[in-house]
Image: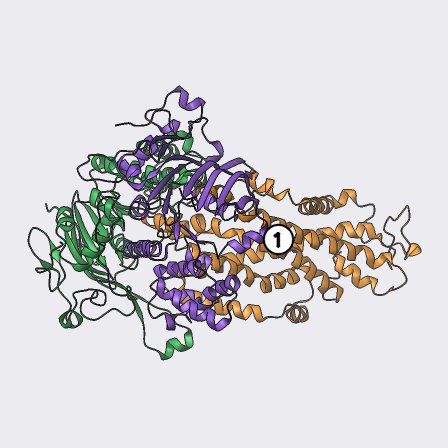
Chain colours: A purple, B green, C orange
Amino acid sequence: MKDPLLRVENLQTSFELHAGTLNAVDGVSFQANKGEIIGLIGESGSGKSVTALSIMRLVPLPGKILGGHVYFEGIDLLRNSDDQMRKIRGSKIAMSFQDPMTYLNPVMTVGDQIAESIIINQGLDKTKARQRAIEVMETVKIPMSSERVNDYPHQFSGGMRQRVLLAIAISCHPKLLIADEPTTALDIITQAEIIALLKELNTHQGITTLIISHNLGVIAKLAHTVVIMYLGMIMEIGTVEDVFKRSRHPYTKGLLETVPRLGLETLPTIKGEIPNPINRPSGCPFNPRCPYAQGKCQATKPPMLEIEKSHYVACFFPIMT
Amino acid sequence: MSNELITVEDLRKWFKTRKGTLSGLLAEDRYVKAVNDVSFTIMKGDTFGLVGETGSGKTTIGEMLLLLQKPTKGDILWDGKSVLTDKQAANDLKLNSHMIFQNITASLNPRKTVEDIVGLPLKTSGNRSWRERRKAVVELLEKVGLTPGTEFLRKHPHELSGGQRQRVDTARAISMNPKFIIADEPVTSLDASISSQIVNLLDAIKREFDLTYLWISHDLTMVRYVSNRVAVLYLGKIMELAQTRDLFNDPRNPYTQALLSAIPNIDPTTSSEFVKLKGEMPSPINLPSGCVFHTRCLYANERCKSEEPDLVDIGGGHFVACHYHSTLHMP
Amino acid sequence: MSLLKESLLETLLSFKDFSRRFVRHKFAVLSVCIVFGLALLAVFADIISPYPPLEQDLLHRYAAPNVLHLFGTDRFGRDILSRIIYGARTSFYVGFSVVAICLLMGVTVGCVSGYFGGMPDELLMRTVDVFLVLPTFFLVLVAVALFGSSLFNVVIIIGVTSWPTIARLIRAEFLSLRERDFVKAAIVSRASRSYIIFREILPNAMYSTVVQSTLEIGSAILTEAALSFLGLGDPRIVSWGQMLNDAMYGLGQAWWDPLFPGLFIGILVLAFNVIGDGINDALNPYLRELK
């Protein structure tokens, strides 16, 4: 039984704000096997982005990782020194973000930015790094890469910029790629292209990928394993088929039902609003909005139970039909 | 008494791009050709979906319909009369239309209270005392699901959640009992669990007030659910226009086919082949010759490059702009 | 939009929030007290001042600070403390009048320029350029030569050379704000143009202007002091700059003569600058929430 590449155990990250303590990630545990694509689904306030930043140890102040373990290749990243983390970021674990324009330097050519990562992480000289940059741009399907390597970010379209970010991320052959909302700002056709690209990077280059999104369709197309998060806690984990076709958690079921289908007079909804994470409901965080909630749900946090092989739910009354 | 509410005829909007004063004197004028000779009709009671990617011109069309932008060419008819020449018709349109915006981009003035925001159309149409306006605002808030209305009067937008802001936006839009509402990406920036609430609300409002909607979006799944007719835009031109069922079941324009194939299905067991397109969307400053889509279309040939296809009626209210529509059926 | 980000980037709207952030800056709070204190002096000068400011006592010229004259006397035996107190009046008068002129002209021009764009914008901005080129001091010289040196003239000229900055700030805000959806919503709601400019956009455009105006008060006071020091000011009124001008005659003899006016000019102008800084920080949402 191979060890998973990434194993997150009981991760806890919170923010001390003036308005109160925000437990962004509260006891999150999941794992990613080598070569897998994990899809992390959550709405606003679910803590999915903070989870990714915690894995990378890039949580911004006033956030702090309070506890838990993040085992990467057997080593707990949370015990690493800053120096050790710097060696891992970029070369072993890489991340791409939602809004490319914010993460690309507007006054550096795209080639220089990709090469920069290569020079720092792999120690190649400038010429070799530039050559490698052109290769990576080809891998992410940026056309005319040998010419466009000298272009600036603003000369690229939104979809191309996202590819540039991915290029920077994979330039040093990382073992794990974390892609935070890679398709959110993009049009449908570009989105489909990026989905295809991510799939290819996973199958051909063997890069284990953690994809974070609020878009159910994107995750359905890409992920092997799906993790559903709500207000900092995991509600359900399973294979993509289990979670999408045999959802057990009322939240998952509710979420999937809100996707419009034909022939419905009104769309099914989840009643109420997502509460402010600072004032998280006691017990199961979903209980105020859950159609099946009972007294027990408000009093105690449901533990994560394996309801079927490799299918986990945190619910006292999972849907068993 | 015709059933046509708004008709758009050969509508065009070109924005002049500004160049520096010196080079501007020397060089030729360049235009961002956002909307190019678009024609369609919205019937009373329609939910007319306008879909397209960024740069398709859909928002600009919406703004022109509310007279927020002046068309470069073409005409807009309200109840059969031209709003560009007939002042009365223009007034009529303005009195009976409103817009719901994408909430994230500050469609609510951050410095104002909910009462001010929702009460503005009531204020500008004059004659009511502030007491009467307040009563009307409370009623409107409760109608859109914000109860008790009085609690929300003094709140500022930043104190509201995304869903609540969208409800306030809706309340403002219906405050003057309009006949026509343009909803520009009304649920795109909302969480999934909230957006279905808003869609249901807009549907209920439509039935109660007997409204007609123009639903602008790039979310095809949502558009398919809410609209009865859909127009697909690309670079400011209509590629296809049909009843929703016809468009989604039998798309005849290669662009529509590509769009539909790109929709990610939430059933992981179905595998749909995504129709790949060549290259990228060209800039609206340099529109391709002939069919604007020819640079990316897999079937394009010489004719597509030189000859622009007309929007032809292939029966049943289904219009396509493609030279080869009869040979292209979605597999 | 992440709820976490939203709670970290909450827009400033309530005064309570603003004051809470403002009082975190101890120096800013101190400056407010200083300004308030000096303002009280200015308002109640008639009651507080120990001597009339113009009363000369030639028997006690250049008296060092003592029990009768806490700040000493100047070359005409006038009590310096009393003159400081009355001088505060002048400073506040200059500061606030100049800012009033700046705001009146700057906001009007900025609004029209920023909202309408096109030709009006071009014309107004070229006018602004002309005003920016005008050198304050030389203008005052010319004005003094033509119209005599009165405080009123000085105030007008400082105001006229300072308003372009405000105009540009407002214009820049308008250029970006007018494209926002809430403005489009107001147009669709059939609000009049002046309503949109003054009730919808302007309240959102004022943030940077508030900060700039506070700094402008300090700057105007300093300019008036400098002009008076150079002898271009109004000799009939009591002003701290004028006192410095007087102090030139006995330079080296009486250290208290230039010290107190100089000190008070520095303190007041610095106080306004620190307040402006404090307002800027308090309005900036990104610095919030760090305990």
Left or right side of C31 for B243: left
Q: Position of residue A164 (x, y in %)?
A: 40, 61
Left or right side of B46 for A47: right
* Residue A151 lies in quadrant: bottom left
Q: Residue furthest left?
A: B315
Quadrant where the image shows the N terminus of chain C = top left
Residue under the point 32% across and 74% down: B29
Q: Residues within 10 Å of mark 1 (few under 14, many from 20)?
A: many
**How many numbered marks appear?**
1
Task: Report the chain holding disc 1.
Answer: C
The answer to whether residue C189 is seen in the rendering is: no
Which amino acid, by three-letter code, is at mark 1? Answer: Thr
The residue tagged 1 is C214
The answer to whether residue B267 is seen in the rendering is: yes
| Of A60 and B273, the residue lying toward us | B273
Left or right side of A20 for A159: left
| Of B123 and B265, the residue lying toward us | B265
Quadrant where the image shows the C terminus of chain C = top right
| Of B327 and A30, the residue lying toward us | A30
Residue under the point 66% across and 56% down: C218
Left or right side of A307 for C247: right
> Element at badge 1?
helix
Q: Residue furthest front?
A: A1
Vertical placement of A98 versus C4: above or below?
below
Q: Position of residue C113 (x, y in %)?
A: 45, 61
Q: Residue furthest top?
A: A295
Q: Residue furthest right?
A: C59
Vertical placement of B282 versus A304: above or below?
below
Q: Position of residue B174 (x, y in %)?
A: 29, 39
Residue under the point 37% across and 80% down: B26
Q: Position of residue B278 (x, y in %)?
A: 25, 65
Vertical placement of B198 versus C233: above or below?
above
